[in-house]
Amino acid sequence: MSYEHTGNGLLPDAPIAVTGTVVVAGGPPRRRRYGTSLRRLANGDLLACYHESAGPENLNDGAAVIVRSRDGGRTWEHPVAIYAEPGWNCGPVGGVKVSPDGTVLAVVGKMQRTVSTETTYGLEMSRTATFITRSTDHGRTWGELESIDGFWPYFTEMYGTSDPLVLPDGRLLFCIQGTREINGHGWEAAVTTTDGGRIFSQPVVIATSPTIDFNDTALTRLDDGRILAVIRTEQPPYHAFQSYSADDGATWSEPKPAGFLGGTPCLYRLRSGALVCFYRDREPDRPGVSCVLSRDDGAHWTWIGRIYRSPDWFCGYPAVAQLSDDTFLCVYFTAIVDGNSEVRGVFLRDRS
């Protein structure tokens, strides 16, 4: 299933090119869909995860939903809810991840939300809980929900588009984040390690500030062994920040603005070694999903185009899965239009 491409497109000299598009999950019926993640499984299937609820309002309803493709993303099966509780706002708070042994992990959560003038989104989070569930049969059946410790007083989330990273000693490095203050204030971005996704270490904070909220983070390993983290911020003008670790996540450099405005980052390394970061664009005149390129391990970023043009800023959460040596799929959610949003995908060719 395809749709008319609505982005401004990529620049002619960009090292990636759009080769096709697909609707991963759409209507009818109308649904609010957001918070996408994507992984390629050990058996070659693609598994996407997102939040789905019945109306455009962010109410105490909805579920964490998965949808599968068995043919490299060209067609997608009917969505299946893997976690929901009546009367709760439920959804992925990290989405699907794959461990080196092929086990599929899904990080999900629940919260109560009420209208508030005290938060960025006009909503107050309370009574939050975060869980992990696992599948050893490529996401067909799932185990019991296992609670993840509340490392922060009010909310703990495990957003990460490319984790876990496998460390030299075999431990897995995950992104993790949380709020140290009520009403969604005091976000901190961090990493945690685990030997198998059951017990997580005390987080190592990458970015924290009394005036800036840091949360959604993407990681990648550089050729020189360092780890690069690109981090979302919540205060205008919404600078993306970045930090480096030279000791496998034990310590991090002071976060600095990356040079572009945007959140929900997703990092992907091209065959040439250059990095592409897909992200929710927060330039006031350019809402949508854009991408920037770095040929020097994040020292400088250059805008190379937009894969989705949106009527407003609430869209994005791009996530990428490699399909072959020179092709990959990037999925994201669209803005809510007439009470409906979709999960869409763009097939891209690595021209580097």
Image: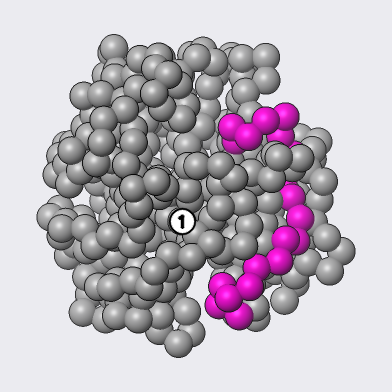
Q: Looking at the image, which is closer to me, 186 or 161? A: 186
Instruction: Quarter of the image for the N terminus: give it.
Output: top right
Instruction: Look at the picture and state if 11 lies above or below 280.
Output: below
Left or right of 209 in this view: 12: right
Left or right of 260 in this view: 8: right
Q: Which residues are magenta?
A: 296-315
Q: Is residue 81 found inside the magenta-colored segment of the image?
A: no
Instruction: Name the residue at the right extreme.
Output: 12
Instruction: Quarter of the image for the C terminus: give it.
Output: bottom right
Instruction: Look at the picture and state if 316 lies above or below 221.
Output: above
Residue at x-position 62% and y-position 23%: 336
Q: Is residue 313 found inside the magenta-colored segment of the image?
A: yes
- Identify the image's colour scheme: rainbow, by chain, secondary structure or one colour: one colour
Instruction: Look at the picture and state if 5 lies above or below 98.
Output: above
Location of residue 296 in the rendering, given as x and y in whole percent from the top left corner: 61, 80
- On the question of residue 306 being in view, the answer is yes
- Residue kind at label 1, given as amino acid type: Ile
Residue 293: quarter of image = bottom right
Location of residue 231 in the rendering, given as x and y in whole percent from the top left corner: 46, 56
Residue at x-position 43% and y-position 65%: 255
What secondary structure prevails in the magenta region?
Answer: loop
- On the question of residue 69 being in view, the answer is no
**Which residue matches tag 1?**
231
Residue at x-position 47% and y-position 79%: 222
Residues packed near mark 1 inside 10 Å, few (<14), some (14 to 19) or many (20 plus): many
Residue at x-position 26% and y-position 66%: 172
Q: Looking at the image, which is closer to me, 331 or 185? A: 185
Location of residue 249 in the rendering, given as x and y in whole percent from the top left corner: 29, 71
Q: Secondary structure at mark 1?
A: strand
Residue 335: quarter of image = top right
Location of residue 269 in the rendering, given as x and y in whole percent from the top left corner: 57, 71
